[in-house]
Image (tube, grey):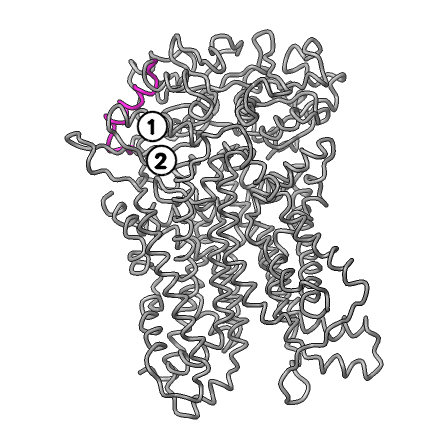
């Protein structure tokens, strides 16, 4: 740990001396350039010396710039001294949740407790797997249930305290308490009222493949879409899921990404689009408020796979050397007066328009999760999505 | 003092070491486990043929179009009397300053803004054009120098033999450009093969997007590794193709005179339309990015999202990492460039090619490979700036090697021999004769490494030290992993453009000497 911080701070020096490329050239190069500068009476080729000087000047300039900016850049790195507490704690979070959202949560916790954070953005199960026992992660905060379910299945997680799990609405976390939900998103249908009336929208997700909607809707084979597929396989079976997906592929337009689905419905390219709820809110913030949006969010009227709730999960890694501190953070994260308050009360930048999940919590932006008519199911099914993968690939639907 | 032979041995050992280190990521594919069954399974899916075909078609189309635009633009600025040639040169090189995924996002957003009902940016042709417009400068920069070095005497001889102008162009001029075209188009092709962000945004499903989906959507890493091997094999075929394109060595000069500047094609009234037409290239390449960035900066929403202090910090970090990558890649590449240009042989060529292979697998796989290897071999380096710089060096070493070779070709061996005859020792000949003469190529290589490193995203995300941002990752952080929100991303995009235009300007200034 200390070595790492030292390295980050002393980058300009270190990169030169410890580049493990078994190559003496970087080390000998200062002498090399010294030789260039040395007085030389070799007049026959003195014309070359302007080049040589320029080489030296450029190298020197680069080194100076690197050294200067290196100092300022490393000033931003964590400084775990200070803090005031008897033993300053720095927790390492691996996350694939939205960057601003995670920072809002960790900043609030730092303000309350003095605990600091190292944050690995865009983390994947693959990175932790590749790191093996050398993994630095104490905590994983996922966007969708799949990564934490995978980590749980791989036996890499420590169980979460029962008291922590009980703070959260039932049915959203791992049944074995290997991870706990700390936020949630729902699948929704976006529609453009200029192109289709709310009354004409399909009553269920499975109805969207009906002939009257042919060519009218967009979808994207994102992670949440794969999750929906896995859910459908586990409930209505492979055959019916395959039928539905074929209809989706034939009648809808694959826009590849949820953000594209949102933008194309908003722009009037498609009447409807299958996506996640929060992308709409992010766009709303971008254009200065929900009132400035043309498109609208539609929740299917009955309990429906089209309203599927997907938990964002918090997990503590078995490999962590700071389990008590990590567990404490997760307990705060799921507490209605802790992390949940940041999600409930925060604007779009700090909450990313996620749903809070604590019992009795409600977001001032998107409302309460209890109003969403999602089927209740075990999200551990996402630990192994090979059925969905195989089906989607066989049908030729894949990112 | 090194003996002549032992000096060469050191160069060979260093080169081979660098070559082997470059192959480490490919080795990782085997160590971490892959299965040929996965590749076999791939061929049972209905879309696979389309994806491989699309990958090849995009690579060929973008490479071809890059040659057309790159060579055309080079001839325009070096060998015609079109006005504003120097400005044009800088403008033609400028698209290099924009990361591929940013220009793709911008083009897509502009498409949605002005023609929401039409699939322009996301069609095969649209994607080909957008990608070409961000990659052709590699060909352009190499060809400006090559076009300038064409010996007009050869064309004059051909004309005196009553060859028609078209036939002179194809049979005399173009063959002399082949080495420059081949070296630079390989860079373009490998970029296309491993591109992820831009391809997703432009709705092109290639082998690389399939690999990324395996990792990100399905968590199937073994399949991702297996397909990466397939991609590397494909890249190898393109590398061989590039080698063939470069052709046999060609007679450089007629007689023993020094090469004169080539004659300029005189255009009369056609000059202005020609200028307007050629201005279209940088305009279409940079217009959408400039437009969306400006709109983003002026957008009323999300004022809070602009934190200039963070943007400046990210700028500093980006500059530091890129500068170190440039310096170290230059130093590491030199022995190899020296070996392959001074002692071309089967082994030196194979070593040089091996450096390119790491360039062909998706950056995300390369990053996983480095995570895997670093945590086992040098755990102290993991999540430090040093490892990130090493990753950049492995990724962009080919750019350094390619340009150093061009530079070393300008430093004729006979100058070195002349110095030797004056009794100068080897190291002095190196520091006083060959290196200064090769300097332009070496500097261009370093600047391109720095430029590409400052734009890199995927590897940076995984290896960046904790709590540090670069401009690319800062910009990515505002996308919420989906579409670019130009209101929040604009400051990062602006700084990337500013930062990127510095090396682009330095490189074009270097070649402006060739523009009369």
Residue B7 in percent (x, y) is at 38, 79
- Image vertical order of residue B370 relative to residue A213, above or below: below
Q: Earlier in the sequence, mark 1 or mark 2?
A: 1
Locate residue B153: give its quadrant.
bottom right
Quarter of the image containing the C terminus of chain A? top right
Residue A191 in percent (x, y) is at 65, 18
Quarter of the image containing the N terminus of chain A? top left
- The chain identifier of the residue carrying mark 2 reads A
Q: Is residue A239 left or right of residue B170?
A: left
Q: Secondary structure at mark 1?
A: helix
Circles 1 and 2 in contact, beta carbons < 8 Å: yes
Q: Is residue B378 left or right of residue B463?
A: left
Residue B393 in percent (x, y) is at 43, 57
Locate residue A226: give its quadrant.
top right
The total of numbered circles placed on residues is 2
Q: Which residue is mark 2?
A: A119
**Callout 1 environment at 10 Å: few (<14), some (14 to 19), or many (20+)?**
many
Residue drawn at x 50%, y 54% is: B452
Q: Is residue A213 magenta?
A: no
- Image vertical order of residue A247 relative to residue B326, above or below: above
Q: Which residue is mark 1?
A: A106
Residue B237 seen in the figure: no
**Looking at the magenta stretch, what is its main secondary structure?**
helix
What distance separates the C-alpha of mark 1 from that of mark 2?
A: 9 Å
Residue B320 in percent (x, y) is at 38, 53
Q: Is residue A332 magenta?
A: yes
Front one among A94 and B167: B167
Residue drawn at x 35%, y 50% is: B385
Locate residue A334: give its quadrant.
top left
Front one among A396 and A113: A113
Query: Which residues make up the magenta segment?
Result: A319-336
Q: Secondary structure at mark 2?
A: strand
């Amino acid at each position: 740990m200390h070595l790492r911080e030292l390295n980050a701070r002393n980058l300009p020096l270190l990169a030169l001396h410890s580049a493990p490329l078994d190559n003496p050239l970087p080390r000998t190069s200062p002498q090399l350039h010294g030789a260039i500068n040395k007085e030389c009476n070799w007049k026959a080729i003195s014309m070359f010396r302007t080049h040589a000087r320029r080489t030296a000047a450029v190298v020197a300039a680069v080194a100076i710039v690197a050294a200067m900016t290196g100092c300022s850049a490393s000033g931003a790195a964590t400084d775990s001294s200070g803090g005031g507490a008897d033993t300053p704690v720095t927790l390492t979070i691996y996350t694939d949740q939205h960057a601003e959202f995670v920072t809002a949560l960790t900043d609030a916790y730092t303000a309350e407790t003095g605990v600091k954070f190292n944050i690995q953005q865009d983390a994947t199960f693959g990175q932790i797997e590749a790191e093996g026992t050398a993994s630095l992660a104490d905590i994983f905060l996922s966007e969708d249930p799949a990564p934490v379910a995978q980590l749980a299945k791989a036996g890499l997680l420590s169980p979460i305290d029962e008291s922590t799990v009980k703070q959260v609405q039932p049915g959203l976390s791992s049944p074995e308490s290997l991870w706990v939900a700390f936020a949630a998103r729902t699948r929704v249908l976006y529609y453009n009222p200029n192109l289709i009336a709310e009354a004409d929208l399909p009553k269920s997700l499975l109805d969207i493949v009906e002939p009257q909607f042919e060519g009218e809707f967009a979808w994207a084979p994102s992670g949440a879409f794969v999750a929906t597929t896995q859910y459908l396989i586990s409930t209505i079976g492979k055959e019916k899921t395959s039928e539905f997906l074929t209809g989706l592929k034939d009648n809808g337009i694959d826009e590849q990404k949820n953000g594209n689905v949102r933008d194309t419905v908003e722009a009037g390219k498609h009447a409807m689009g299958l996506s996640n709820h929060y992308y709409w809110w992010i766009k709303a913030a971008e254009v200065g408020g929900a009132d400035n949006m043309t498109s609208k969010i539609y929740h299917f009227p009955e309990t429906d796979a089209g309203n599927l709730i997907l938990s964002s999960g918090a997990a503590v890694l078995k490999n962590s050397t700071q389990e008590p501190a990590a567990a404490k953070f997760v307990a705060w994260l799921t507490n209605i007066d802790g992390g949940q308050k940041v999600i409930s009360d925060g604007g779009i930048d700090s909450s990313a328009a996620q749903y809070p999940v604590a019992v009795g919590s409600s977001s001032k932006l998107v409302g309460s999760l209890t109003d969403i008519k999602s089927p209740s199911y075990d999200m551990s099914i996402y630990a192994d999505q090979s059925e969905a993968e195989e089906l989607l690939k066989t049908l030729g639907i894949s990112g | 003092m090194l003996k002549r032979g032992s000096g060469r041995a050191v160069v060979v050992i260093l080169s081979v070491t660098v070559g082997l280190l470059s192959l480490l990521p490919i080795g990782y594919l085997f160590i971490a486990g892959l299965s040929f069954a996965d590749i076999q399974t791939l061929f049972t899916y209905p879309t696979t043929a389309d994806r491989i075909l699309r990958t090849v078609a995009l690579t060929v189309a973008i490479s071809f179009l890059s040659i057309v635009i790159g060579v055309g633009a080079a001839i325009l600025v070096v060998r015609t009397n079109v006005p504003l040639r120097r400005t044009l040169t800088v403008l033609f090189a400028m698209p290099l300053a924009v990361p591929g995924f940013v220009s793709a996002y911008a083009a897509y957003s502009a498409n949605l803004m002005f023609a929401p009902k039409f699939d322009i940016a996301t069609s095969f042709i649209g994607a080909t054009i957008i990608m070409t417009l961000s990659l052709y400068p590699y060909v352009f920069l190499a060809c400006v120098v090559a076009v300038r070095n064409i010996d007009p005497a050869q064309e004059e001889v051909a004309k005196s033999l009553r060859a028609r102008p078209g036939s002179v162009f194809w049979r005399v001029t173009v063959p002399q450009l082949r080495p420059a075209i081949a070296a630079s188009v390989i860079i373009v092709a490998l970029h296309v093969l491993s591109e992820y962000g831009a391809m997703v945004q432009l709705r092109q499903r290639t082998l690389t997007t399939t690999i990324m989906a395996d990792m990100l959507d399905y968590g199937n890493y073994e399949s991702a590794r297996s397909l990466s091997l397939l991609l590397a094999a494909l890249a190898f075929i393109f590398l061989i193709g590039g080698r063939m394109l470069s052709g046999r060595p060609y007679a450089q000069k007629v007689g023993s005179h020094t090469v004169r500047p080539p004659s300029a094609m005189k255009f009369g009234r056609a000059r202005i339309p020609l200028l307007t037409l050629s201005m279209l290239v940088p305009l279409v390449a940079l217009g959408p990015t400039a437009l969306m960035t400006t709109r983003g900066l002026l957008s009323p929403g999300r004022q809070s999202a602009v934190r200039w202090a963070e943007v400046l910090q990210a700028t500093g970090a980006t500059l530091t990492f890129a500068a170190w990558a440039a310096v170290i890649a230059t130093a590491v590449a030199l022995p190899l460039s020296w070996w392959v240009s001074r002692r071309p042989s089967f082994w030196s060529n194979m070593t040089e090619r091996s450096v390119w292979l790491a360039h062909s697998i998706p950056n995300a796989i390369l990053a996983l490979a480095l995570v895997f290897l670093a945590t086992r071999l040098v755990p102290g380096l993991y999540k430090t700036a040093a490892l990130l710089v090493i990753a950049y060096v492995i990724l962009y070493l080919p750019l350094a090697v390619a340009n150093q070779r061009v530079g070393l070709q300008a430093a004729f061996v006979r100058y070195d021999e002349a110095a030797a005859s004056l009794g100068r020792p080897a190291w002095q000949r190196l520091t006083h004769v060959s290196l200064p003469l090769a300097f332009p190529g070496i500097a261009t290589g370093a600047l391109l490494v720095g430029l590409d490193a400052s734009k890199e995203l995927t590897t940076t995300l995984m290896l960046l030290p904790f709590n540090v941002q670069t401009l690319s990752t800062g910009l990515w952080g505002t996308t919420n992993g989906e579409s670019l929100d130009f209101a929040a991303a604009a400051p990062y995009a602006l700084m990337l453009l500013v930062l990127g235009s510095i090396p682009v300007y330095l490189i074009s200034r270097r070649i402006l000497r060739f523009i009369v």
